[in-house]
Amino acid sequence: MTTSTHTSAPPVEAVGLVKSLGSGDSRVPVLCGLDLEVGAGEVVALLGPNGAGKTTTVRILSTLTRPDGGTARVGGFDVATQGRRVREIISLTGQYAAVDDKLTGRENLTMMGRLAHHRRRAVDDRVDELLIAFDLSDAADRLVATYSGGMRRRLDLAAGLLDRPVVLFLDEPTTGLDPRSRQMLWQVIDDVVAQGTAVLLTTQYLEEADRLADRVALISGGRIGTSGTPDDLKRRVGEAALEFVVPTAAEAAALARDLNGFGPSVQATTVRIPTDRSLSHTRAVLDAVEHSTVTVDAWELRSPTLDDVFLASTGRPAVPVTGKEVAA
């Protein structure tokens, strides 16, 4: 149950993708020349507000939607003209679990393996591996109708990994999962990537992108506007800072005067001091605060997050939402 690419090209390579949704005069541009590349054994998280084109990009790359313009190759195969070959080497887990309630978990996986024309013994062995990996062994012979939402999502992802795909597309795979199930999926994704699979992930959870992604790409205006490693993107937004919260704006101004030598900035009742996060610098700032007459309600050492990157790039906070992306 292995797959191979057509060439040594990157597993995912898209150039100038263009796509509009709707019909007639109501067509809305979604992708406006998007370029994207995902390497072998690499996780790229595709981020953007709802309607930015994340799911549309995944649908084009997985041959479910044809682009209006541009080119895309997956595993070296053209998604527009060699769709069958692309589908042989990819796996797609969408926003909703696609499993059969009237079958058991084991029967679901076995059916998928047999539909792919794999040998029965190979299918049985792989099903056992996946049931263990996804902590579904105890429930393997129960009807899926009795599964929790998290169990269904795990089974859905397991079905997508019956083959070891060259490219794994994950479109918001952990939406609605509890923290334990989410952590379990993250570990499985780590294991898949370690075997060389390329992963394109869309997610509303920036913690998930930070945890899994080698690179983050943010869609803006139908194109990739910002791209880089999570750490690089966070450094571009700003530096780490010590933040002190005081009761009033007047007291914030007074504390800023007391900390003038550390380059403070003030926003409402918060005083912010840039820091290199070293112990010596932190201690020096805290000593100065201790000698101030201003009462500090709370303080923290805060580093930029992907939420800050998202806000800087899109002009809006990254708030997880419920429901299907409109112009995904």
Image (cartoon, helix red, strand yellow):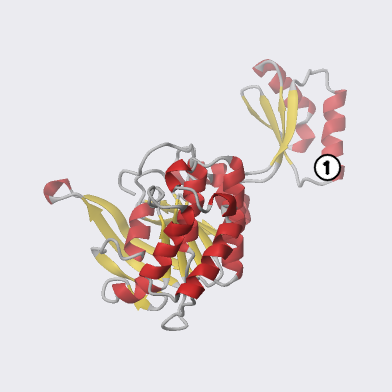
Tell me if I can see residue 212 in this picture. Answer: yes
Specify the farthest residue to the front: 141
Q: Position of residue 223 (x, y in %)?
A: 37, 57
Tell me if I can see residue 229 in this picture. Answer: no
Q: In this view, does 133 lie above or below 76?
A: above
Q: Residues within 10 Å of mark 1 (few under 14, many from 20)?
A: some
Residue shown at 48% from the left, 49% from the top = 153
Q: Could you tell whether 94 is left or right of 209 in the image?
A: left
Residue shown at 16% from the left, 46% from the top = 26
- Quarter of the figure with residue 264: top right
Q: Position of residue 226 (x, y in %)?
A: 48, 55
Q: Mark 1 points at which residue?
A: 281
Q: Where is residue 85 in the image (x, y as percent from the top left)?
A: 34, 76
Of 200 and 15, which appears nearest the observer? 200
Q: Could you tell whether 236 is left or right of 16 in the image?
A: right
Residue shown at 60% from the left, 41% from the top = 179
Q: Is residue 177 above or below residue 202?
A: above
Q: Name which residue type carries label 1.
A: His
